[in-house]
């Protein structure tokens, strides 16, 4: 995928799943720094409190397919690392099943020499340095100010906190959380929660399923 979804074909209008602070940030970044046009927010009916946000309609997720044809609209699921990334992962997969095209965004103020190998529903904030030969999976969030060394692989459903460093050649497994200002110097197995310099394991998820995670506290 090219940076910020920029390509020759006119992009589809976008619906943002969520109304949290992250969803509001996503709206601003997509509106001001991408070719995308955000046409709506959506949340489940039980969480719907206001019908508009930032001047844009908020619609019940239960009705979104009737109001916005999936084949004509894209979706970005703007949920952080709630429940170890599970909620974002489940909603991203649900939106795909409903036929919406997931988008990804890379800030124009992130530094990279080549096009970034990035999956779907991923979001890269400003001031990230992404060296060559980096692979970023689906449903990944890179908060601002990170250094991602060359030949790094970041698996699906990960969250990389602000001002972290991933040293060259490191592989980060699926569903990992790297806390802000961490330095990751070695491979992380899937489901790891790490923090510090050097990064230490805080929690390890031993079983990850589509609908939940059974975890064991690291020793």
Image (cartoon, rainbow, N blue to C red):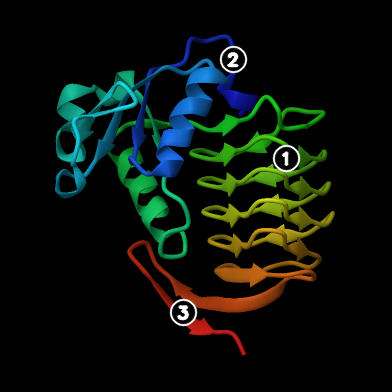
Image check: 45 left or right of 158?
left
Foreground: disc 3 or disc 2: 3
The picture places residue 93, in percent across and down from the top left corner, at: 37, 47
Q: Quadrant of residue 112?
A: top right
Q: On the rendered image, what quadrant is the C terminus found in?
A: bottom right
Residue 191: x %, y % from top left? 55, 69
- Circle 1 residues within 10 Å: few <14, some 14–19, many ≥20: many
Residue at the image point whose x is 33% and y is 41% from the top: 18
- Give me the disc on residue 159: none
How many angstroms separate mark 3 from mark 2 (CA)?
41 Å
In the picture of the structure, the residue carrying the numbered disc 1 is 128
Q: Residue 109 in the image: state x and y as whole percent.
A: 70, 28
SS assignment at label 2: loop
Task: Return the residue at label 3.
Answer: 215
Relative to 39, is 98 above or below? below
- Tell which circle, 3 or 2, labels the residue nearer the N-terminal end: 2
Q: Is residue 200 above or below residue 48?
A: below
Q: Image quarter for residue 17?
A: top left
Q: Dot 3: within a 10 Å radius of its alpha carbon, few (fewer than 14), some, or many (20 or more) residues?
A: some
Question: 10 Å neighbourhood of mark 2: few (<14), some, or many (≥20)?
Answer: few
- SS state under label 3: strand
Q: Which residue is mark 2?
A: 7
Q: Is residue 141 left or right of residue 47?
A: right
């Amino acid at each position: 995928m090219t940076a910020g979804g920029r390509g020759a074909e006119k992009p589809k209008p976008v619906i943002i799943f969520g109304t949290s602070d992250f969803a509001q940030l996503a709206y601003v970044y997509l509106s001001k720094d991408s070719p995308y046009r955000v046409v709506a927010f959506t949340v489940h009916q039980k969480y719907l409190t206001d019908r508009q946000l930032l001047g844009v309609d908020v619609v019940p997720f239960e009705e979104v397919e009737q109001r916005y044809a999936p084949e004509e609209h894209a979706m970005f699921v703007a949920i952080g690392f709630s429940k170890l990334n599970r909620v974002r992962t489940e909603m991203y997969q649900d939106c795909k099943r409903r036929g919406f095209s997931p988008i990804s965004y890379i800030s124009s103020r992130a530094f990279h020499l080549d096009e970034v190998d990035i999956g779907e529903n991923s979001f890269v904030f400003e001031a990230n340095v992404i060296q060559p030969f980096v692979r970023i999976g689906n449903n990944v969030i890179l908060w601002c100010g990170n250094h991602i060394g060359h030949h790094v692989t970041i698996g699906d459903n990960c969250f990389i906190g602000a001002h972290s460093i991933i040293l060259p050649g490191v592989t980060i497994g699926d569903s990992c959380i790297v806390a802000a200002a961490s330095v990751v110097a070695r491979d992380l197995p899937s489901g790891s929660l790490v923090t510090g310099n050097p990064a230490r394991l805080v929690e390890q998820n031993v079983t990850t399923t589509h609908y939940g995670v059974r975890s064991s506290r690291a020793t």
